[in-house]
Amino acid sequence: MPAITNKQQLLNQAHTVLKKRFPLPALEPEPPRPLLEELLFAICREGSTTEDAEAGYARLRKVFVDWNEVRVSTVQEVGDALRSLPNAGPRAGWIIGVLHAVFEMNYSYDLGDMEKKGLKQAAKQVSRYFNEKDLKSHGLKQAAKQISRFKQVNDFAVAWVVQRSLGGHAIPLDGPTFRVLRRLNVIEETDADDMESVRGGIEHVIPKTRGPEFTELMSIHAKELCVEKTPLCGACPLKNDCPTGIELLSKKPDKDKPPESKPKKSR
Ligand code: SF4
């Protein structure tokens, strides 16, 4: 039986022990990125870690002169610049789609004044770049086609911008974070169909001030220990509280434990 059965306690416990296990550098980039750049960075960051996304994003900036050049390039060209990230091709299509949407709806790549509209309005506006129907109504069929392939992960990008650029409370949930939360039994497999309400539940437990740190820790943990195929539960600081870890470790010997010495036979 897990030592912690309450989901709220388990999430708080996970945050505390993972913080000790994975000490974080300062989270905010210097200087802060403009809103559009944060949105494009979010696309690099989804399913990755901040460190890996920074490397991919920096290469994207280096290879192309400006965002317009990215927009008019092929998926293969942009994907090549992002090849250090998983799913570079689909990610490239997503970035191109968003750039088309932003350019056609604003006639520029500057979303600078959006923050002044207030959090709700700004978040609503950002969501429009990911809304297939909205894009089609603007005649943006190509962008809509690219964007529609990312229905679920678009929720991540919008939540990321709300958390990092707009000063709101949102916990972006990508595939790896979802995997960790599912294994911890905090969320169910079927919850993926309603990301908004899953996020709402997590945001209720993790306060705004700890949101960015929680997001980082989950991603690093997913990459280092709670990996996709076989999680490294024996080395995980959550192994005594995680239902999946307890189950997996009960089935096989813990490789990280030193072998027990056999009792000596008395003569
Ligand atoms: S115990 Fe295993 S399944 Fe649970 S969080 Fe840790 S690595 Fe993931």
Image (cartoon, helix red, strand yellow):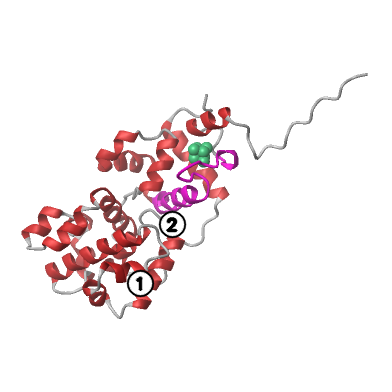
Please indicate, yes or no, whether residue 84 appears anywhere in the rendered image.
yes
Q: Which residue is mark 1?
A: 60
Please indicate, yes or no, whether residue 32 appears anywhere in the rendered image.
no
Task: Give the residue displayed 29% in from the left and 56% down from the top.
Answer: 157
> In the rendered structure, which amino acid carries the disc numbered 1?
Leu
Does 30 appear above or below 257? below
> In the rendered structure, which amino acid carries the disc numbered 2?
Thr
- Across and down, in percent, residue 34 comes to 30, 70
Q: Spot the residue most to the right.
A: 267
Residue 127 tag number: none
Task: Give the residue displayed 21% in from the left and 63% down from the top.
Answer: 97
Residue 49 tag number: 2
- Across and down, in percent, residue 108 comes to 17, 74
Work out whether mark 1 precedes mark 2 in sequence or the reverse, and give the earlier one. Answer: 2
Q: Circle 1: is it few (<14), some (14-19), or many (20+) Cα within 10 Å? A: many
Is the residue indicated by label 2 positioned so its CB lies within 8 Å of ligand 1?
Answer: no
Please give the range of residues in magenta.
Answer: 209-237
Drawn side of residue 194 relative to residue 242, left or right? left
- Across and down, in percent, residue 100 comes to 18, 67
Secondary element at image label 1: helix
Task: Give the residue displayed 48% in from the left and 32% down from the top.
Answer: 244
Q: Observer-nearest residue: 121 or 158?
A: 158
Secondary element at image label 2: loop
Drawn side of residue 53 relative to residue 34, left or right? right
Cα separation, mark 1 vs mark 2, equals: 16 Å
Q: Observer-nearest residue: 177 or 86?
A: 86
Q: Look at the numbered discs 1 and 2 and tell me whether their residues touch, using CB distance below 8 Å.
A: no
Q: Observer-nearest residue: 205 or 133?
A: 133
The verdict on residue 180 being magenta is no
